[in-house]
Every structure is written in structure tokens, then in C-alpha cells.
Image: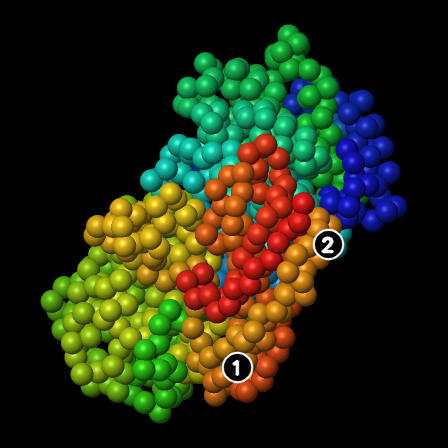
Amino acid sequence: MPLSDGRLGQYVADGRRAEIQSRVSSLLEQMTLEEKVGQLNQRSVHFVTGTEDEGAALESAVADGEVGSLLNATDLETKRHLQQLAVEESRLGIPLLIGFDVIHGYETIFPIPLAQAASWNPDLAERAERIAATEAAAAGHNWTFAPMVDVSRDPRWGRVMEGAGESPVLGSAFAEARVRGFQGEDLSDPDTVLACAKHFAAYGAVEGGREYNTVNVSETALRERHLPPFEASVQAGVGSLMNAFNVHERIPASGHESLVDGVLKGDWDFSGVLVSDWASFREQIQHGTATDRREAARKAIEAGSDIDMASEVVIDELPGLVREGDISEERLDDAVRRVLTVKGLLGLFEDPYRYFDAERREEAMLADEHREAAREAACESFVLLQNEGDRLPLDPEADVALVGALADSGEDTLGAWSFEGRPEDAITVREGLESFLDRAVPFAPGYELPGEVTEASIEAAVETATDADVAVTVVGETAAITGEAASRADIDLPGHQRRLVEALAETDTPVVAVLMNGRPLAIDWLAESVPAILDVWHPGVEGGPAVAETLFGEHVPAGHLPMSFPSSVGQVPLAHDRLPTGRPAEDAESGYTTGYIDAPNEPLFAFGHGQSYTGFAYTDLTLSTDAIDAGETLEATVTVENVGDVAGRDVVQFYVRDLVGSRSRPEKELLDFETVELAPGERADVPITIEDTDLAFWTADREWAAEPGEFDLMVGHAADDIAHTERFALLE
Ligand code: GLC
């Protein structure tokens, strides 16, 4: 267990490494076979304590050393009680890992992760997870099942709200930041938790965007698109990973030896622990790759997976498998060593109750500075999709009407995966506007959540809007139709919200749309009927004030899309890094080129798209050289100027095209990005450096390498808004 490496080892003080490793070795020598297997058995408290005898059964299992970790426990005293049983009742007193899904905040709920990715500011995510860890760790948790780092280009899949969108480059930057945020400087600090990069691997590519569906990705797509954020997480020292539910090459991820033992624990030398997703070990039976629970347990452990979250196939079957030599003691000891090591890193052996501090809990939850950080994160995540005629920002003196039930919903302001967040703690858009304007704002729900309208509800909304100078209509998705088990085949606004918006657009009152959503939506009709659209996603506990500050210009929107918005669901999957094909769309004169007869190839709003209340011009992209050898660096610099009237922040995007490769290469793919804040009229040079390693891909020789040849470097405001292109060469 190489704790000395710079990855997981960076989260433990030098002096503690040897002590942890010797304690782990000593425990392993003392442990019986059953006690070792117990460390690989995780039980869900939330669902188990439904009845008294189930609760009692869990208590005795913990006291007998048959449980190594828990999840879904919410009550502090329950967590403390179960930890006491493990530490004081079991023979060796090994403390429990206590895990929870802290996905975008604990009680202080931040914008959903996809929204945070729209900030293109990984430091924002690191700060958010630092705060989330502080709160979760004060509530008895020492492990979070986050960050979710699945790359996806299919907005039909509800879980895109948990990730960082379609780019492995943007996704890797956010993955690293989130790991650092959760794990802090030292995992034994009482305000840090073990992070868990999930779901390993390629869950974001479920066919048809259909939840839990099969995945069919090539090795090239796996290596270039889906694995990089996991590798980035491992390089950042993540302490755990979680299996995906899906298959890769028809083999379930939990039992996929070449993926787990080969790539994760072999190539990447991952020294942390791998936990199943829910019952994914046992689900190998449903996949049809295991005959029974015994074979399911054998295949999972043999492949290199370690902890069985909820299926209990490991606690039931592993002792027999080891006794009969089907699983080696060595593999068992490797898994247990990993579990004990992360417990050592967390300082649980010295003080297993460090996470149960009621006073710290009281101080931490929803602290003012936490709320402030959540509001700033919300502001930075908003994307101004369009603003024809500069309808935004609004004049605070204007008579503003507000329409839309989502504007009044605390639960939907928080978003999915907000378990310990309370709707009553969320400041809604309605409350935010009224507080900002310091007056009541005429309001009409316009629709019943999630989107049902009636003639009466539309009439009332139209009447409310007619009397106003401007109507802000809040439309979009409820949290419940986003997240896990929430795939949608139709990704328009739910219900009949469209009828409401079109009725408002027919009045003489100018309309502004505020979109609350957990995924890119196919809303070309909205873009045609409403000149100004601000995407605020599910903005978290401080969403209301952030929306108000942005609508009235106190905050200048600077978000950019981390995922393409299709013009129709028929285009999906859709992303900026598409291949040229043998019939590139640019050769349109022939007619026989890649495309549809009833839809464009282009998205409605491209990856990287986002407007501002000011404007930025990019002049002269200059390269330090037009050719580099392997190991040399090229510096590219673009001059950015704020050509508008207000200060703002810009996300400068650099894309690259490898013109010829041993495999077909994308027309463009995000290479790097930089943000810059500029006052009106201010200019700044924005540099990036490029090395051959930045140009690597999965070559036809099945190696991760850059190939000599010519490249186009592009700088742009979005994937479909390239300002300058310069060519350079990577020499033999
Ligand atoms: C769920 C999710 C996973 C989560 C786990 C525990 O099914 O797939 O992301 O961490 O179960 O709640």
C-alpha cells in the first residue's frame, strides 16, 4: 500500500504513514477470516432501520464485527451509537466508515454540480466541497460518495446534473478540485471526508440516455472520454472509487478485471478502496454474467472490487470462497488492507468519535460564510443564453411581474441529491426578487408543478404580466425529474409550460425567461419567442438572491455551457468534439454530407456558450513557435479586451484539432481554458502552454501518445464561436 506516493499519501502527515501501516499489518495478523470479510460488508442504515428487528440485527452485526462501513444514516445519535458498538463491542474494535451522498452540499446546498461546472472555475467547486465536508464531517460522516465524474453528452440521462458535462478536460479539472475540497490537507483533520470518484466507468454513456441501460463504448472512447476524470481523481489522491452499474464490453463494471485490476489498480496504481454502487456486485446475476450470489461475489472480488455496499453477497459467500481456495487470502488481505488504511488516514483508530461533535455541528450548518459561498457559486454558474436587444439587466425601478411556480419552490431551488438540505432554508427566486427590490412583486404561478397549465392559470398569469413593465417567467424542470432514475425521452420543458410562455409573449409586456433545469433542454421554440433567457439551473440554497442580483445587473453573468443544448432531442448524443466523418458537413454543395433532412447538425446553444452584459474581443492569437519537438513547450497568447460598458469575467476557451492521426480525430476538442476579469476598455494577454503530452490520444497502436503532425489551435468564446486559428506542428 504505497502511502508514500504523492497521491493518497499526500493526505497524511509524514510521521503517521509508518504508524498507520504497522497498525494495519498488526490488525490483519489478528483478524479472523470472518472479521476480514466483515470489513468489506457495508450496510445501509436508512433502509434497514425500517423495523425494530432489522435495527437490532444491524446492531448485532456491527457488534460482532460483521460490518465495516455504513451509508445513509442521518440521525447523529444513531451514527454515534453504531460507532460505539463497533469500537467498544467488537473483538478488535475497528471503527466504521460512515458514508453519505454529499453531492452538492450537506445542509448548505450549492448549485447542482453541472451548474458549478458552468462557472468554468474549479476553485469554486473546491471551496464548495470544502464547506460540504466541514458540514458533513460535523454530522458524523467521514466518507462522501462524490464527486460524480461521469462524462456525458446525452441530456436525456437524468444524472448529467451530478457531473461536469461533456468535456473530459473540463471534467478532469472539476474532478481534481472536488477531491481536494473534500479531502483537504490531511484526512485526519476533523473537517475532511474521504472522497469517492464515481461511477467507474462510462455510466454517462448509457444507450438512449436510458437510466441503468447498457453501455457500448469503444476502447478509444473509454480511454479518451470516460477515463480521464477518474485518472485525474486518482492523481489528485482520491481515497475511493465506486463501481458503475453498467457493463463495458458486456462485462459488468464490478466484475471487470481488466478495468479494475488492469487499469485502476494496475496502470494507475490506485491505493485506495473500491466500493460497489448499491447492489452492483449481486446485479451481475441480473446482467446474466453470474449464475448465483456465490459467483457474483467471486467475480467482483476477483476483479479487484473491494466493498459490497448493500447486496450482502460478500458477507454471505466470501468466507466459503476463501476456505475453498476460490479467492486467495492474498486478494482478501489486499482488499481489507485498503479499507483499514483509509480508516487509518481518517484518524479513526486514534479518535473514532471525532466526527460526532454536536457543538461543531451547530456552528457549521448553514453558517453565514457558507451561505455567502453558495450565493457566489450560484452567481458564477448562471449562463446568459441570449439577450437580444439587451433586455437584461432589468431596471429596479421598473414594475416587474413574476410568473412561474418554480419561482416559489424551495425544493426545486435546491435541486436533486440534496438530502440534508431543507426546502425551508432555500431562498426562492420570488423571495430573492422581493428582498432585492424591497417590495412585494406581483406573482402568478402560471402552472402547477411540474408543468400543468389551465386556461385559468394562463389567464391569471397574462393578467399579472399585462399590468407590468416587464414579466420575468421562471420555467424549467422540477428537481424530481432530474438526477438518478429520471431519464427523459422528451427534453422540452415539462407539461405545457410552453403554452404559458407563448401566451405571455403575445402580450405587450416584454418577457424575460429564467430557466431552472438539471440538464440541457431542447427549447428552440423558447429561444425564438423570448429574447432574453438566463439559465440558473437548480441554484441551491441562495438561488433567489443570486438570481435577483443577476437580473438587475448587480452581478454580471459569466457562466458558459459545460454541455451542448440540442436544437432537438433527435440530435442526441451531441457534443463539440465530433469527428469529421468521410462526408464533412462543410462539403455541403454535394448534398451527400453528414446531416439530417429535418434538423441542423449544430446545437441550439453550443458547448462553451454564454453571454455577458458586456463584451469581450479577442485580438491576435500569437504562438511562441510554429513547431515543437516532444518535450518542448509552445506558448500561445491571446489578447482579450472588454469592449463593453461594465466590468465582467470571461472564459477564454482554447480548442485544438489534430489534422491527421492514426485514428480519426475530432474537428475540435477543448484543450485548455483560462478566465479573466476585465474593467471596461481593459485589455489583458491570456497565455497557455502546450506540450506534446497535451496532444496525446488513444492511437491505433493502443497507446496513449501524441503523434507528430500538424495541429490547429483555436481560441474562442464557445465551440461554435472561434475567433482565431493558428497552425503549429509537432515534429518527429
Ligand atoms: C445510488 C447511486 C450512487 C450512490 C449510491 C448510494 O444508486 O448510483 O451514485 O452513491 O446509490 O446512495
Q: Is residue 728 above or below residue 272?
A: below
What residue do we see at 85% from left, 44% from top? 16
Q: Which residue is mark 1?
A: 642
Q: Is the image coloured rainbow, by chain, by secondary structure, or in one colour?
A: rainbow
Question: Which residue is at the front of the view, 253 or 127?
Answer: 253
Question: Which residue is at the front of the view, 248 or 294?
Answer: 248
Q: Residue furthest left?
A: 455
What residue do we see at 68% from left, 60% from top? 634
Q: Quadrant of residue 342?
A: top right
Residue 480 visible in the shown view: no
Check disc 1 and report its element: helix, strand or loop: strand
Q: Is residue 624 above or below residue 548?
A: above
Mark before the other along the chain sequence, 1 or 2:
2
Q: Quadrant of residue 241?
A: top right
Q: Given the image, on which type of amino acid does mark 2 rest?
A: Glu
Q: Quadrant of residue 603?
A: bottom left
Q: For this view, does 21 lie left or right of residue 470?
A: right
- Say which mark, if any, is on residue 632: 2
Question: Which residue is at the front of the view, 350 or 131?
Answer: 131
Q: For this view, does 631 lie left or right of residue 406?
A: right
